[in-house]
Image: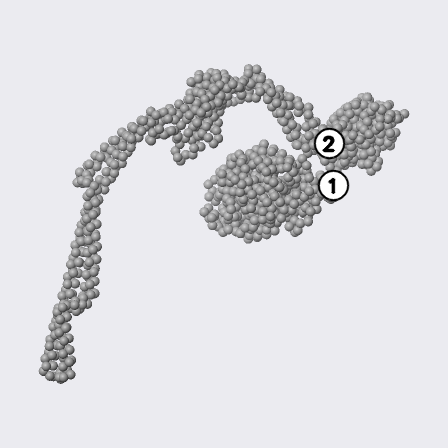
Amino acid sequence: MKIAFIAIKGIDRIGGVETYTLELGKRLVDAGHQVIVYTIKTPQYSRPFFHEGMWIIPLPTLKHVYFEKMLLVALASFHQFTIKHLDIVHYQAIGPSLFSFIPRLAGRRTIFQSHGHEWAHAWNGLARIVFLLSEKLSFWFAHDSIAVSRSLRHYYHKKYRRDVTYIPSGITPRQSIPCQTISRYGIETDGYILFVGRLSKEKRVHDLLLAYQRLKTPPLKLVIVGNARAGDAYGDELRALAGNDSRIVFTGAVYGDELIEWYSNAYVYVLPSETEGLPITLLEAMSLGRCCIASNIEANVEALSNKGILFPVGDVNALSTHLQQVITNPAQVKHIGSILHQHVLSNYTWTLITEQFIRFYQKVMQPVSGQTANLLTMQGKQTMSINYPINRAADVTETTNMASIMLPEESRGYYAPPQQQIPFRQYWGALRHNLGPILLSAIGGALLLLVLAALTNSTYTAKSSIKVDTRSPMLLNYDVDTARPPSYIDETVFYNTQFKMLRSRDLAKRVIDKLAIRDSLLAERPFKPAMYVLTDPFNDLVKFVRSLLPTDGESSNATEQVTAEEIFLKNLSIKPVKSSRIIDIQYTGQNAEQARNVVQTLTQTFVEQQYEDRREVAENGKRFLNEQIYSAREKLQAAEAALIRYASVKNIVDTNADEPLIAQKLEALNKAYMAAKENRIRTQSQFNNKGELSGILNAEDDPVVQEHKQELGKLQGSYLSNLELFKPNYPAMLSLQEQIRSRERLIAEATALIRKNTVNNLRASFDAAQDEEQKLAKEIKLLEKELLTFRSDNIGYANLKRDVDSLRSLYEGLLQRLKEVSVVETVQSDNVSIVDTAVAPSRKDGPSYSKYLLLGLLSGLLLSSLLILMREIMQPKVRISADLQEAGGKYQVLHALPYNKAVSEGSTAILRPKAAVLWLDALRYLRTSLVLANHGKFPQVLHITSPLPGEGKSTVAVNLATLLASSGHKVLLIDADLRKPTVHKHLNLDNSSGLTNYLSGNLNQSPLYRIKSTRMLFAICAGPAILDPVEALSSSRMQSLLDKARELFDYVIIDAPPVLGMADSLLLSNRADGTLLIVANNTSTKQEVRTSIECLEKSHGKLLGLVQNMVPLRHISKTSNYSDGRNMLIPA
């Protein structure tokens, strides 16, 4: 199925209806259906988009507390025509359902859903009337309806006799969220009492505040979550009532997880409302296991199902007592919360609700079949059987356990109610019946507008156009545009400023003075003098009445005459051309030339004013710059003098090079110091770690040592070679040994000397590097001290120099700007230019007389038709037999009697050959119907009455009695209408004595008259008027009269007074064998017929049926005149 929901304010404006629609919609999408939701167009949501599978269509509307939603619904009702193959149009709430007839024009199935008594909210009187009217019309316009609570369902059944389907609100089971975000309010878990909802008077939050304030040092805080409607001061009243109590917290509107967090950590939830549909906030609190206290209205009772805590609505003391009890009994609070949690999960989950909606949609979509079921329905206190068309395939009783859980006991035998069609025929009948007043209204409206047009002075409208740019042409690089908006201001602000300047009183005064039209403006009057001949006396009367009322000084000055500027601005119209920089200027006056001159002068004056404003700004700028230049010059001179004095005291010569030289020296010394330090570290390392090794290595490399080693090697070689020949003690060998020892001694001495010299050299290098490092460090410290001293002395000098430089720059800039402004002042370059010059209008304003005539005819026609239709909607009258049958309910309409003027003039005329055939046939049909309605026997005592006077009951009584008498039956006709009798007029009888004389016991002669023209017809006239007709008719003499009549006559016909407002007919109905209720066409309303039936039922009379009287011939069956035209046989 494709379903369209009309309409919600937005997916981000979460309220009760919005939540309901979105939750249901996304689940319908999950079930495979297509869902369209209409919302308000916003900058964030300006185009159609998908949201959780739903197709969201934003539509524009007006931002108004009353018209925003209604205009959205109207546009959505027409927009749905653009959606192909749409199955269901679902209107959310009673107010929007006022437009539910629009989709039916395309044959689409339309339903509406009631979320509560919207008319009972804090609206104004007009809004309440609209909601009540919408509630009544919705049952005519929509195919079917839904109520979210049983109490609503019972209310609609009782008031409108409509069977509304009950489908409650649903909730989404959520996990509790620990106290995190809300802790910023100083809140702890189970540490507060919670209310969630809109802050409006019907929520009675003030009761909760008063009850909380009566608690004895409550350990819990009170948290109120929600906002008031725009423009509703109730929220401010609540904050004033709370005062400065830090224990009462107002959070404003809260959504999403934070709202769930508030629910999750509340100790108890309170809902003190006086009206609700089925409160979703209460269900949400229950779903999270919160103990709930609510007022004992029907919706809250239904939601809590005797499992929560209820208190009488508006009873602050009872609420305070319950709060004190739950505070002192936390175990009970947890127990109640657990029970409510299980109750919600068993009955109010969205899964169950969605399944029930799908079955409901399927039922609505099914065409009406020819099958019928004999079902019971309640009407008043009677139980009756009516055949209604049903479709078994859509019967909710065939659902699974879900239906048995969700539906109340009385709705499990659910059946499809009969389709309510728009009663176009009824409305057309109302218009046709009131055709004369409608035509008179149309003619009156036409004449009124023609007279108004003739008495209205002619007006002429001159037009011109100007172009306004945000900036002037840049003739100079340093142009000064004083009209151009800054870059951070929107152009809309700039143009709105220009519009306001065009309608300024100063500009109007300039134009009026230039043209010298002040007197002519004050003399202008919208109408010709003849009109004021009629209105001036009324105005004088109003002034006289006001003069009699006490007034103060301020109110006495409130009636001053209108000024010429106000008249001028009233006639002036400024209209910006959309998506352009063009502004249309129009002026309406009673003189064409004057109107042209005004527009021309206005545009020229506005352009001149723009140039004058620029010049004035430039002159003011020059004046300001001169003042600033003088001040800057004085400050610059003083600063320069202070700089020179400071330099003299501190011996500072500003070469701009002293500090850089010191810094360079310091940098060079730092580099030398680092090099010396590296050298010292290297020499120290060589001395400490490589001294001995370096000596050894140097000795090995020494030439002398190497020479000695060579010689030593030779000696050792000779010694070894001779050792084979000689013994070691051989002198030659001893000599070689001595030479070897000598060489070894020389090598050792040379090596030791070299090693000693190497170590000494390394020490000397280390000592030199260390000395150099220490000297450089001392030099750096001295230079750093010198630099710090220089900087310290130069701080004051630098500050003074900086002041001098800044003042000099400011002074030079001001001089340059003064030169630029002086040049720009002489240049005429503006951002306003005239596009169209005004010309004298050749035609006067307004429509011609023929158009006035047509407009008056249409206005009178539409207004009168609307009033008639409104009256018909609010109080529908009986016009056709179907209307009477609907009002009569179980009582059948026996027949419809045609209207015939001749019949009402005399009863004996009906027996003549030239009598009204249709009337005779209708009367005979009625007689037969009475026999059938009374189990085959005509009632012996027949009581005839009507709801209201003038419905022809006496005419029917006289003619029916005459018809029975003409058939050979002895008939007595009793005129029991003691208030306004008419039987004696129909039968030309003397009414000087009659029933009243008999009942009062003052009868001197028999009240019985025998009708000469009809021998078997006898009549008793009403007689003279008496003070208490009810007392007379309830007397025993009246009963004895009827008893005697039963014995002497075959039939007794009682003509009784109307039912409504009098008890006469109720007494007579109880004493008769049957009652016939006569209802004239287009006289009684349906409600009056129902009330009459209820009154007759209370009297325990037997109502045989209803008769529609005075029916136009066009509504009478043509077969009633069935004959071949032969002459009738006249009875003897």
* Residue 1009: image tag: none
Residue shown at 76% from the left, 25% from the top: 980
Residue shown at 12% from the left, 69% from the top: 704
Q: Quadrant of residue 990?
A: top right
- Above or below, comparing residue 770 to residue 827 in the picture: below
- Residue 1039 in sight: no
Q: Position of residue 902 (x, y in %)?
A: 79, 23
- Above or below, comparing residue 268 to residue 443 in the picture: below
* Residue 880: image tag: 2
- Residue 920 in sight: yes
Disc nearest the viewer among 2 and 1: 2
Q: Position of residue 586 (x, y in %)?
A: 48, 23
Q: Quadrant of the C terminus?
A: top right
Q: CA distance from mark 2 to mark 1?
A: 21 Å
Q: Position of residue 742 (x, y in %)?
A: 11, 75
Secondary structure of the residue carrying numbered label 2: loop
Left of 659 or right of it: where is 596? right
Left of 962 or right of it: where is 123? left
Does the CB distance between marks 2 and 1 fall below 8 Å? no
Density class for disc 1 (Cα within 10 Å; few <14, some 14-19, many ≥20) is: some
- Above or below, comparing residue 110 to residue 464 in the picture: below
Question: Is residue 100 or residue 174 the one in the foreground?
Answer: 100
The three-letter code of the residue at mark 2 reads: Ile
Q: Quadrant of residue 800?
A: top left
Which residue in the protein does label 1 denote? 386
Q: Quadrant of the N terminus?
A: top right
Residue shown at 44% from the left, 19% from the top: 512
Left of 563 or right of it: where is 341? right
Q: Position of residue 734 (x, y in %)?
A: 11, 81
Question: Is residue 633 or residue 561 the one in the foreground?
Answer: 633
The three-letter code of the residue at mark 1 reads: Ile
